[in-house]
Image (tube, rainbow, N blue to C red):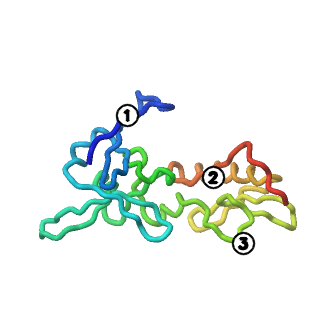
Amino acid sequence: MSLVGKPKSKGINMSKAKPWCYIQVKDGIKVKVDKEDLKRIEKHSWRVQSSVKGGKPRVVTSIKNKEGAYRTMTLGQFLLKPRSGKQVFPRRYQASLDYRKSNLILCTMKERQIMLPKRKSKNATSIYKGVSFIKSKNTWRARIEYKGKQIYIGDFDRENKAALAYNRAAKKYYGDIAYINPVNRKMIERGR
């Protein structure tokens, strides 16, 4: 493992952001980490492991426990040491090899479902989570599930407006762990 490059500051207020760097793990793959964790991380040999089909790659090492057996541990687990019942996941899924603590979140599996994007389905009427097309009304409906109940947000004339309404509700009900639909304001309306 080796240190690669210098901390980047493009678009980041460096007075608030912690200094970070890239480390290089086996096979030359670069991983982002906080500089303050570098000494602890360098004590172990890290590798990228591909998870089950369709899953994101993760950075892991094998650590010997008190009984002498080896346990595979992710870099996120190593850094945050989650208590029983909690797991470590990246906030931004497109940045799965970003192990800066600001990108990691401790949560239960149930909480993780809130953070996941919409499941792909051939029968889906919308590309956005929490949005569906109501053919009888010719509108886009936004809904969110909270504490096991469906909450109606509203009907909208455009799909992206419904997605933005879902995003506001998701932030209201779930805060930082909410999944936010990536709505592009220049999106071309889909023909319906």
Among numbered discs 1 and 2, the one appearing first in the sequence: 1
Residue sitting at x 53%, y 49%: 175
Toward the viewer: 102 or 166? 102
| Residue drawn at point x = 36 percent, y = 35 percent | 18
What crowding class fits label 2: few (fewer than 14 Cα within 10 Å), some (14-19), or many (20 or more)? Answer: many
Report if the CB atoms under discs 1 and 2 are less than 8 Å apart.
no
Q: Would you name the residue on which mark 3 appears?
A: 123
Rendered image quadrant of residue 9 = top left
Q: Amino acid at mark 3?
A: Asn
- Return the residue found at the far top: 15
Q: CA distance from mark 1 to mark 2?
A: 29 Å
Q: Mark number for residue 181?
A: 2
Residue occupied by mark 1:
7
Q: State the separation of the CA atoms marked 1 and 3.
A: 44 Å
Q: Mark 1, mark 3: which one is toward the viewer?
A: 1
Would residue 138 be found to the left or right of residue 28 on screen? Answer: right
Going by the numbered disc 1, the residue's amino acid type is: Pro
Residue depth check, mark 1 versus mark 2: number of the one nearer the observer: 1
